[in-house]
Amino acid sequence: MIPLVSTAVMRECDAREVARRGVDALVEAAGTAVAAQAHRMLGSLYGRRVGVLVGPGLNGADGRVAGALLQARGCKVDLISVAGQPRELRGYDLVIDAAFGLGCTRPYEAPLVSAGTKVLAVDLPSGVDADTGAVLGRPLTANVTLALGALKFAHVDGDATRVVGQLRFASLGIETPNESALIVDADLGGYVIGRRDDHKWTHALSVLAGTPPMPGAAALVCLGALSAGASMVRLESMGKIAKLVSLPPEVVRVRGPQVDPRSKCVVAGPGLGTKSGEWLRERLSDVAMTIVLDADALTPRMIELAHRAPRVLTPHAKEFERLGGEVVNGRRIASVRRLAAQTGCVVLLKGPLTIISTPEGRLRVVNSGTSALATAGTGDILAGMIGAAIARGHDPLDAAALSAHLHGRAGSRLSPYESATSLPSAVTEILATLASAASRIPA
């Protein structure tokens, strides 16, 4: 995970690191990381023209170190002070924005850059509020932003995301808390938790999904759950859908109204329709195991009904609004945290950037989503995956976040012509690759 912190927390972490290593060492590390990123963006360095916008603070100091390193490697480097910056920067292959970083609280008007000039922002594009993601003035639009020490909320939330470009990260060896964090590929290594004494009930999952008008949702939830490691899936649907949909042989069809107490988690809602309230009430009112509420189960009444159980809500944008969530000024993180606190549930708001929060405000962000996931049925598969991850021992926050990241990575493997039914196979392939890699690591 890459930590995600506020300005105040980042300042505290920086101060501790300065006390331990000294400010010059920290600036040297940051400038070296910036120069390395510039090298990656430019390819060859000799003869390339680089302009470095430098401000009066540590961000500017980082830029000066980077400029000196690039010049030593053959670049033609101009240091441009923001105090005397021109209206436009012409003739540069790369502009490094090291004007104002974490501490920018007032509008900044950046110079214009010529078409074709690449822009590298140091920590943040100058002219954004690090905590709210508000755009202050006219920042440069970065091709790449190199976050230093930790991610800041402006990197992933608010209007500032449109000027961040590709996000890269350099830890600089700074210790930061990970109460909030971005999920990365390395976090998937422990996704499937198992023990030597596992049996079919160890990671069993109950699914309440599907009606004759929407039988496919039940199949997709089950496929998602099995691909993510559920040892048994027990499915109950509204009405007779046995002849309407093909289910994997591992799925056991059951009749309620009680959920089997041996299951470790329940996934409820996909494909049930808006008239399923009473049917769900009979099955969920006494359930104490974790419940993943998705699709047609995402109603205030159902959330309150299942109050005995830990709950994970998985809305898309319209379902989020239906539950009372409201996104103000593009700040989705604050909105998700607010709804999680109001409902007492873990809330996962789906989107190109998926945000997950606990009621206490612990946060995970997932940016692996692709347009391939904006098709019917992919959310049903994600619900099944989250249920399976919970059944395998993950807490609800990690189950939701890791599943969403894996779901996104699987989606990136699909062609534009493949449907949701191809996703589970991609999930299985990724997990098999991870397992194979783990088996080659010496004990």
Image (tube, rainbow, N blue to C red):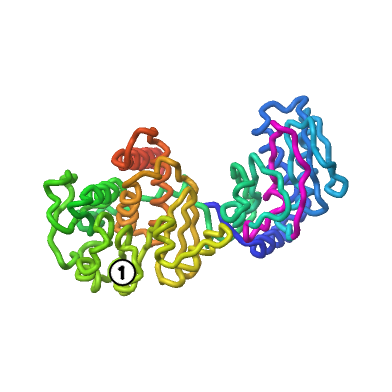
Q: Is residue 210 visible?
A: yes
Q: Is residue 338 above or below residue 429?
A: below
Q: In this view, does 169 lie above or below 263?
A: above
Q: Is residue 17 above or below residue 226?
A: below
Check the image and name the residue furthest to the right. Answer: 84
Circle 1 residue: 302
Residue type at mark 1: give it: Met
Place of residue 39 in the rendered image (x, y in percent of width and height, measured from the top left): 68, 33
Q: Is the magenta stretch mostly helix, strand or loop?
A: loop
State how many labels appear: 1
Of 63 and 359, the residue lying toward us: 359
Q: Is mark 1 on a helix, strand or loop?
A: helix
Of 311 and 197, the residue lying toward us: 311
Please rate how many residues cluster around mark 1, counting C-alpha atoms within 10 Å: few if below 14, some from 14 to 19, many from 20: some
Place of residue 172 in the rendered image (x, y in percent of width and height, measured from the top left): 65, 49
Residue appearing at x 42%, y 61% in the figure: 320
Of 256 and 358, the residue lying toward us: 256
Residue appearing at x 23%, y 64% in the figure: 276
Place of residue 396 in the rendered image (x, y in percent of width and height, measured from the top left): 38, 62
Give yes or no for residue 147 being in the magenta stretch.
no
Residue appearing at x 79%, y 33% in the figure: 90
| Residue 413 lies in quadrant | top left
Q: Is residue 205 visible?
A: no
Place of residue 21 in the rendered image (x, y in percent of width and height, measured from the top left): 73, 55
Q: In which quarter of the image is the C terminus?
A: top left
What range of the chain is rendered magenta? 106-133
Q: In this view, does 175 lie to the left or right of 321?
A: right
